[in-house]
Image (cartoon, rainbow, N blue to C red):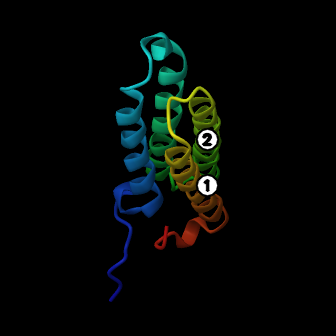
Amino acid sequence: MRTDVIKSCKDLKVYQMAYKLAMEIFEITKKFPKEETYTLTDQIRRSSRSVAINIREGFAKRKYKQVFIRHLNDALGSSEETRGWLDFAKSCKYIPEEKHKKLDGNYDEISAMLFTLMKNWQNFSDL
């Protein structure tokens, strides 16, 4: 009997990771300068949250293959957008080099998982 059956999007490792990273970015951005509130802070929070939310919305519509894949593709785009905002945060010296490297690597891993999930959407118990 299989114990790794996916019953909700919360069972997907890629969703768990995306959610955790969005919360980590939320905490980090609390320390960004006030003048970034409506620019970098807002943008990076939105894009990081969008990764998890698109996975969740796609999972809810997984019955329709193309809709599911479209949401995963949107999540992939948001993951890459977040990496871009992380680059700006590092260049502006709002986050240290090592924190940037860790977060960027995590989002690279999420992007790879999303790509794999799009290609193997019928067998997603290991993602």
Question: Rounded to the nearest whole Å, what is the CA distance between mark 1 and mark 2?
Answer: 8 Å
Determine whether 103 is above or below 85 in the image: below
| Quadrant hosting residue 74 | top right
Label 2, secondary structure: give it.
helix
Q: Residue at x 51, y 69 (%)?
A: 124
Frontmost residue, 105 versus 8 = 105
> From the viewer's perspective, is 12 left or right of 73?
left
Q: Earlier in the sequence, mark 1 or mark 2?
A: 2
Residue 108, label in figure: 1
Determine whether 54 is above or below 14 in the image: above
Residue 83, label in figure: 2
Label 1, secondary structure: give it.
helix
Say which amino acid is labelled 1.
Asp
Q: Residue furthest bottom?
A: 1
Placement of the N terminus among the 4 image quadrants: bottom left
Locate residue 2, reporting x and y percent: 35, 84
Frontmost residue, 80 versus 86 = 86
Say which amino acid is labelled 2.
Arg
> From the viewer's perspective, is 42 left or right of 78?
left
| Quadrant hosting residue 114 | bottom right
Frontmost residue, 104 versus 122 = 104
Circles 1 and 2 in contact, beta carbons < 8 Å: yes
> From the viewer's perspective, is 117 left or right of 55?
right
User: How crowded is the residue under tag 1: few (<14 C-alpha within 10 Å), some, or many (20+)?
Assistant: some
Q: Residue at x 32, y 81 (%)?
A: 3
Locate residue 24, reporting x and y percent: 38, 42
Locate residue 101, reporting x and y percent: 57, 50
> From the viewer's perspective, is 127 left or right of 19?
right
